[in-house]
């Protein structure tokens, strides 16, 4: 039994964001919105080896003289061996700074350079994207992206939604995608319906500064969303009595922790999330997915016995994987998204703190209406977490918590013909407005949306 079962689960637990392949258009606007400079826009697509396929008009690459057929070997002083290394290297270059590119061209080494142009802004139907920033408790700036409907103003304030993304270290700022990712599409649809929405990029992701996302813990990430919520509530075009939080996957874990005891949040909406300890979730999820993949029960149990030993030492004894495997070499296994101190790209301290969160208690302290939503074909989370959340929130407060299942929807807001179809194509099914419509209908029923 291999560890790919759990890896697949946690990969899918992230908000789905397709990989950026190339730049589609040239940037415009200020280089340093909100006091935080945009990262560089190269404007080229590549073969896996780093050879340029094409160069798009008006990008930094064109200005520097980059050509199809060039093989990029350095960005600044960073050596490039594969195209996957180009985007991380570009993150160190901000709009307005000199971007230096070393290429191999027809057997010769050529040095190219040009002032970096900024990443473009999102196109938002019925509105616009504003790029701002908030300062995290650690003193560094985090990128905020606020989508504002046409006509919103201090004289016409609108309801607003803070979106909290999933587990993985992925940016919520991807304006170069041919179509928005399913989660961002929902935010755009809410903006078309007249709502302001805000996203906060994690430390070290997108334009955000601070430590690498893979090194931060649960509390550090949560703190960024808290300052984002305060910034959203302070906007003059936002109706402060109608501010909601939408949490997806891990964002649905953070939402009740952030909201517990607060009276200024109008409502919570969570999708594809859990209400149990992380240890319980990991084991339950591994068994559920193993069965879906057709593995026999004896092999599943053997795998879970080993997995439980590893996770218990990491989550309960607060050890690193290197400490665990050094002391217990028989437990070591190959996992492409695990190193001595990280699991699925996140530092073990993130999971140490997550394990100690009492989610049922957090939900019991939520003082606002809550809608917990589950996708029928969401195999990443248990089938009953959403009903459990609604029950806990409603305890002693009838009607405060509601639950809903959206037919055929997977963990990443797309729909499929069957559960089996969704196993290998999470986030790649048919686009659907069902989640957006559910949110809007729930808000309308509130009487204040």
Image (cartoon, rainbow, N blue to C red):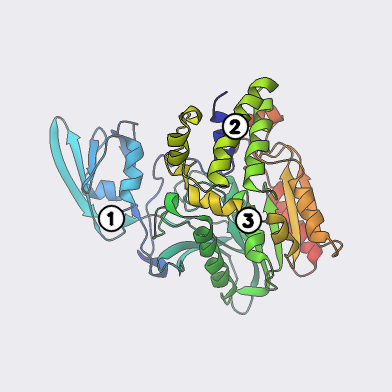
Density class for disc 2 (Cα within 10 Å; few <14, some 14-19, many ≥20) is some
N-terminal of the two: label 2 or label 3?
3
Residue 381 in the image, given as x and y percentages of width and height: 68, 41
- Which mark is first along the chain, 3 or 1? 1
Quarter of the image with the C terminus in it: bottom right
Q: Position of residue 375 (x, y in %)?
A: 72, 42
In the image, residue 225 above or below residue 335? below
Within-10-Å neighbours for mark 1: few <14, some 14–19, many 20+: many
Callout 2–callout 1 Cβ contact below 8 Å? no
Say what secondary structure mark 3 lies in: loop
Along the line of sight, which residue is nearer the eye, 103 or 248? Answer: 248
Q: Is residue 230 visible?
A: yes
Is 412 displayed left or right of 203 in the figure?
Answer: right
Q: Residue furthest left?
A: 108
Image quadrant where residue 140 sits: bottom left
Q: Closer to the camera: disc 2 or disc 1?
A: 2
Disc 2 on helix, strand or loop? loop
Q: Looking at the image, is mark 2 or mark 3 nearer the viewer?
A: 3
Residue under circle 2?
A: 425
What is the distance, in whole Å, between disc 2 and disc 1 at their CAs?
36 Å
Q: Which mark is residue 291?
A: none
Residue at mark 1 = 116
Q: Position of residue 270 (x, y in %)?
A: 68, 54
Viewer-side label of 1, 3: 3
Real-space Cα distance between discs 2 and 3? 31 Å
Report whether 64 appears left or right of 58.
left
Per the image, the residue denoted by label 3 is 357
Q: Is residue 391 above or below residue 152?
A: above
Q: In screen coordinates, is 64 left or right of 352?
A: left
């Amino acid at each position: 039994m291999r560890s790919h079962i759990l890896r697949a689960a946690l990969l899918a637990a992230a908000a789905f964001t397709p990989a950026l392949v190339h730049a589609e258009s040239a940037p415009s606007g200020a280089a340093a919105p909100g006091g935080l400079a945009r990262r560089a826009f190269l404007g080229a697509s590549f073969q896996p080896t780093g050879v340029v396929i094409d160069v798009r008009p008006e990008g930094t690459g064109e200005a520097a003289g980059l050509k199809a057929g060039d093989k990029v070997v350095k960005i600044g002083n960073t050596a490039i061996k594969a195209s996957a290394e180009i985007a991380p290297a570009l993150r160190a270059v901000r709009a307005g700074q000199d971007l230096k590119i070393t290429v191999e061209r027809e057997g010769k080494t050529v040095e190219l350079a040009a002032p970096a142009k900024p990443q473009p802004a999102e196109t938002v139907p019925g509105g616009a994207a504003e790029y701002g920033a908030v300062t995290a408790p650690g003193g560094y700036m985090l990128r905020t992206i606020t989508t504002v409907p046409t006509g919103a103003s201090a004289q016409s304030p609108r309801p607003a939604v803070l979106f909290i993304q999933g587990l993985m270290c992925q940016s919520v700022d991807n304006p170069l995608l041919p179509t928005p990712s399913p989660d961002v599409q929902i935010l755009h649809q809410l903006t078309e319906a007249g709502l302001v929405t805000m996203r906060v990029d994690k430390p070290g992701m997108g334009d955000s500064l601070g430590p690498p996302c893979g090194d931060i813990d649960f509390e550090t990430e949560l703190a960024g969303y808290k300052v984002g919520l305060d910034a959203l509530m302070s906007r003059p075009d936002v109706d402060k009595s109608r501010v909601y939080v939408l949490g997806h996957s891990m964002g649905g874990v953070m939402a009740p922790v952030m909201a517990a005891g607060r009276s200024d949040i109008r409502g919570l909406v969570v999708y594809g999330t859990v209400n149990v300890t992380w240890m319980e979730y990991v084991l339950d999820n591994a068994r559920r997915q193993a069965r879906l993949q057709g593995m026999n029960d004896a092999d599943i149990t053997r795998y879970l016995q080993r997995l439980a030993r590893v996770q218990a030492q990491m989550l309960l004894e607060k050890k690193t994987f290197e400490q665990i495997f050094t002391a217990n070499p028989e437990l070591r296994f190959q996992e492409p998204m695990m190193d001595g101190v990280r699991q699925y790209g996140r530092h073990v301290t993130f999971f140490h703190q997550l394990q100690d969160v009492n989610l049922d208690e957090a939900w019991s302290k939520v003082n606002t209406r809550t809608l917990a939503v589950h996708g029928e074909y969401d195999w990443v989370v248990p089938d009953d977490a959403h009903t459990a959340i609604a029950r806990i929130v409603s305890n002693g407060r009838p009607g405060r918590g509601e639950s809903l299942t959206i037919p055929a929807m997977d963990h990443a807001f797309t729909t499929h013909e069957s559960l089996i179809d969704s196993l290998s194509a999470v986030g790649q099914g048919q686009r659907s407005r069902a989640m957006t419509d559910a949110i809007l209908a729930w808000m309308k029923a509130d009487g204040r949306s």
